[in-house]
Image (cartoon, helix red, strand yellow):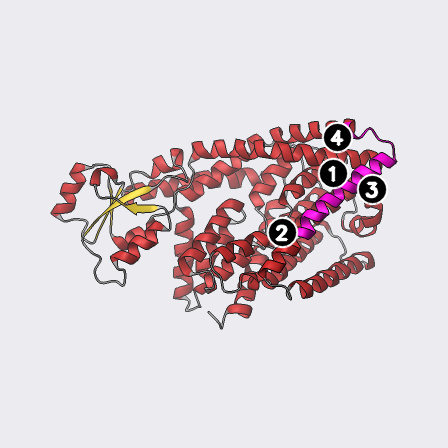
Amino acid sequence: MTLSRIWAAFIIVSILVGTFKWITWHDTDIFNRMVVGKSDDTYGYYMVGKETGTSITQDSFVKKMSLISFSPKDKVSSSKYLFTNDPFSDSVRILKEQNSSLVVMTYSQALKRTQKPVDGIIETCWTSVNIALKLIGIMALFMGLMSIAEQAGGIRLLSRLIGPFLTKLFPEIPKGHPAIGHMTMNFSANLLGLDNAATPFGLKTMESLQEINPNKAVASNAQLMFLCLHACGPTLIPVSIIAVRASANAENPTDIFIPCMIVTFVATLAAMCIVSFKQKINLFQPAILLWVLSISALIVLLVLYLVSLDAAGLQSFSGLLSNGLILLIFLVIILGAVYKKIDVFDAFITGAKGGFETAVKIIPYLVGMLVAISMLRSSGTFDVIISGMKDLFSWLGADTRFVEGLPTALVRPLSASGARGMMVSTMTTYGADSFPGRLSSIMQGSSDSTFYVVAVYFGSVAIKNTRYAIGAMLLADLVGIITAIAMAYLFFGSTV
């Protein structure tokens, strides 16, 4: 029910904001962008006069607009926007008569209200299907390997090894149940930043937990705990973020590494505490404390080693560790199956078929959620929220540097690719080594896409009642955001 209300609210608010922009800002193209807009559209504009009374020069204006795919045109007929410092002049009226669809704005309004093109409803539907199609191959591969591991007894062995810890955190799961092994594989893949492997392992975990779920339409306690921990997206080495910072000419691309580690660890602990409180699980049990402290110690030791590496060394080590581990898993599974005299290929095909079915099953959930998120972005709702927050903190007299990095945090629960775009846009606008640039990088590496995770994972097992999953995830996200802001000020507040 919670997900239904949020989904409905997304759509209603988006349409209302779009209508408000159409009425008050005379943005006659807003509905067209929301329905059939494309993220790769290049919008053109025509300029009349020069901006006066501000620090904006025409050159800087053109540069800023180019960052969001807008370029000047030499003809009014080929432009969608007309920017001027006097929108009510006779010359503007004449130009408007030549192209009645022109949207007229001042230069200042353009910088505040014009946003980078995003996919509309139609394109987002295609995108949803494309995501599922790309997922089919990955799901088939890893589900096939999981089937081999299950038949060879590898998952049960892993369950027995990790069982003493996870059975305390997941008291509803019977000892030795395969779900423990699947869960361990998911957490390990997430920790190493292996998104392609983490998703199949996670979906397999949900299927295993659904088998012991007494009410198939309602999320179980075990499913809620697993998904909330998974949504925090604990990642040891944020390689993709480091690579983006390096491409943006950051002086030290890896300087956000330790803050990212701290933030994702705190958010994961927050999710564990929130769900444990709801489920009345005692976190001070010796088995839980021992495992948490042991994992923390290992992470600290690895961090101490990694911080001694330069950017190239860190990327090389990450690739060796993550990709090498994937191949090692493949090797161990196959060797174990051969030793157990399992029909390896037949077991692989059986599991791969299940992966195909799961990937197809989530398409309706993907379409519904991604369309709602697309409408929020294309209607400009995010711009309204960010502008309001900046005005609020300015009125309170607080330091507002962190507000420029918040778009990444606000989009992150909705769309991973959208948040990545926000991060890149922030670094491009303010600089990779600016406070907002570093803060957006930390926020990008501190959580997963909450609504995407809920739609895909619960959708894969046809659960309609997600209970308090979204509330717990968003609360953990909030803890992560606050921690990210604190870490940014602690590490970079006095240097930028």
Q: Residue at x 82, y 39 (%)?
A: 335
Q: Which tag, 2 or 1, sits closer to the chain's start?
A: 1
Separation (CA) of disc 3 from disc 1: 10 Å
User: Label 1 crowding class (10 Å Cα cut-off): few <14, some 14-19, many 20+?
Assistant: many
- Residue 187 percent across, percent down from the top left: 70, 48
Separation (CA) of disc 4 from disc 3: 26 Å
Separation (CA) of disc 2 from disc 1: 19 Å
| Horizontal relation, residue 18 to residue 123: left or right | left
Numbered disc 2: secondary structure: loop
**Kind of residue indicated by mark 1:** Leu
Separation (CA) of disc 2 from disc 3: 25 Å
Q: Which tag, 4 or 3, sits closer to the chain's start?
A: 3
Q: Relative to the observer, which residue lies in front, 88 or 102?
A: 102
Quadrant assignment for the N terminus: top right
**Kind of residue indicated by mark 3:** Pro
Residue to which mark 1 is pinned: 209
Residue to which mark 3 is pinned: 174
Q: Which tag, 3 or 1, sits closer to the chain's start?
A: 3
| Horizontal relation, residue 452 to residue 115: left or right | right
Residue to which mark 2 is pinned: 232
Q: Relative to the observer, which residue lies in front, 86 or 21?
A: 86
Examine the image and state in which quarter residue 457 appears. top right
Q: Which residues are magenta?
A: 320-345
Numbered disc 1: secondary structure: helix
Q: Are marks 2 and 3 in contact (CB under 8 Å)?
A: no
- Residue mark closest to the camera, 4 vs 1: 4
Asked if residue 333 lies in the magenta stretch, the reply is yes
Asked if residue 120 lies in the magenta stretch, the reply is no
Q: Residue at x 30, y 51 (%)?
A: 110
